[in-house]
Amino acid sequence: MGPVTFPDREQVWRQISAGGGDDWDVIIIGGGITGAGILREAVRNGFRTLLIEQRDFAWGSSSRSSKMVHGGIRYLAAGNISLTRHALQERENLISQAPRLVERLGYYFPLYRGRFPPRIAAGLLFWLYDRLAGIRDHRRISNAQLQDTFRELDTKNLNGAYFYTDAVTDDARLTLRVLQESIRLGGVVRNYTRANRLLKNAERVTGVRVEDRETGAELDLRAGVVINATGAWADRLGNASTAGMKIRPQRGSHLILSAERFPVSHAIFIVHPDDGRRVFIYPWEGRTVVGTTDIFHDRNLDNAASMTPDELTYLLHAAAQLFPGRPPHRENVISSWSGVRPIITSGKSRDPSKASREHQVWVEPGLVSCSGGKLTTFHYMALDVIDKARAFLPDVTPPGETPIFAATTHSGTDVLPAEPRRGERLLGRYGDDAFLLTQQATEQERARITGTNTCLAQVRWSLQHESVVHLDDLMLRRTRLGLLLTRGGEQLLDEIEPMARELCGWSGQQWLEEKERYLEIIGTYYTVA
């Protein structure tokens, strides 16, 4: 079987131009995890489906989440059993179906004296959390055991902790894997393609006018149904107010620190001394992450979100509790990222802790919109959207449930005989294509890039097969090198240049322009202020 290659953008444009605009059952707007999940369900049902994304795939929230695949212990504490149950079921499915991409991780929840929840209530909470997931991972931890894991943590105001498990992932690669599975089933995708406006016949949506953002060319495309999966941007196409809802953009910011200087082997929740919110510190991709803030995002959504100086101070203050003898400072921060998640509200409260994390779907004639929800529940959301879109689609019998990801036939030893664990990691990110990725690479390209678990073979593969249009697509989403290395991995760019110029067809001048563009993005949105 050949590799799963994202369709050539120019070929797709010619295809949709020649089709006269009448080729699609479904057009999905939005190339994040929500749109990717809906695409997979649409093509699995046999619908001819096109997905367009105005920036790059996973450009928005789906590359800038907290990377957690979780049930949400605080949602359960708030009494939202239904949301937690669905999320935990999806978490377990993803751990099973996407091993080494979605990985179980131990979490420590310290019990602060005089703060909610008390020990007995916390025990019941974690018992129910595991019960809903169908596992038993939680256990009570003493202060001494807690300090064995987090040696610098001051435990004098603690009444022990609870250990339990959730999971973490590379959110952008998860999105790309779902897109790849959809392409394998016949889905068509195109990035840097904007929906300029909806087409209507009377009050019914019949299609969309799209623009190639690289050339400015426009086309009118027709579809049985248009699905608006644009997250925080959903109100621009679908009218949420008609369903009694308001989309509130909420920003969460994170810091990346060196794991050598600030090591953690598990996740831990720290109560922030300023406001009592719980902030988590956890390992990810060989680094240590501190997050997250929870702030109303009142900036232009068309610009990438970025951390403010106040958020930087807030997160560093939280991290200082875990490393009091050597607290991290601004100069210790490798990079930062900020994501905007769509929170659905129905009232006037501006308290983010009281807003629902459940997704909402609303239907207008010919248009189905979805917003809210979580990374973890993308599949559950997709099933809901397709169910509501059926009223506008050909009558087909829904297929039985199948795994989201095709089972791999190779092992980690096949992929990297000398490093089978890293081979398994590549299988998690690329499926069976990981075998071709390493077989076609030189020994030098298969070597781990210092400070990361990534290799130049992955860079080459992405340039060749994954619709890289700009350098930031490669460095921030196909790989995470821009987050994991200082100055966005600027020191690697001389090695990447010949591959990029060969496989993207960039001239020397185009490379210089891409490099300048990328470093400006890093300096503006991923470097602390």
Image (spheres, rainbow, N blue to C red):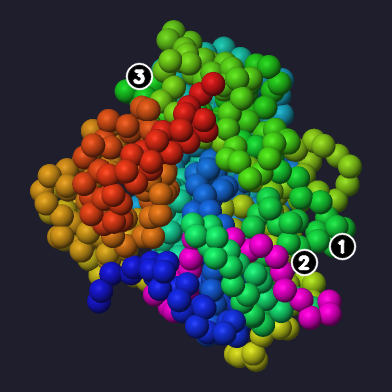
Judged from the image, the secondary structure of the residue bearing numbered disc 2 is: strand
Q: Is residue 390 left or right of residue 282?
A: right
* Image quadrant in which you'd find residue 78: top right
Distance from disc 3 to disc 2, alpha carbons, whole Å, reads 48 Å
Image location (x, y in percent) of residue 412: 21, 57
Q: Is residue 99 magenta?
A: no
Image location (x, y in percent) of residue 361: 73, 65
- For marks 3 and 2, the one nearer the N-term is 3
Q: Residues within 10 Å of mark 2 (few under 14, many from 20)?
A: many
The residue at the point 56 percent across, 53 percent down is 375
Q: Which residue is mark 3?
A: 261
Q: Which residue is mark 2?
A: 362
Which image quarter is the N terminus in? bottom left
The residue at the point 46 percent across, 64 percent down is 178
| Span highlighted in magenta in the image | 182-203
Q: Tell whether label 3 touches label 1 (CB within 8 Å).
A: no
Q: Residues within 10 Å of mark 1 (few under 14, many from 20)?
A: few
Image position of 310 with respect to 386: above or below: above
* Image quadrant in which you'd find residue 497: top left
Distance from disc 1 to disc 3, alpha carbons, whole Å, reads 52 Å
Image location (x, y in percent) of residue 46: 52, 85
- Amino acid beneath label 2: Trp
Return the residue nearer the eye: 30 or 351: 30
Q: Which residue is mark 1?
A: 242
Which image quarter is the C terminus in? top right
Image position of 421 with respect to 278: above or below: below
Q: Tell whether label 2 touches label 1 (CB within 8 Å).
A: yes
The residue at the point 38 percent across, 41 percent down is 513
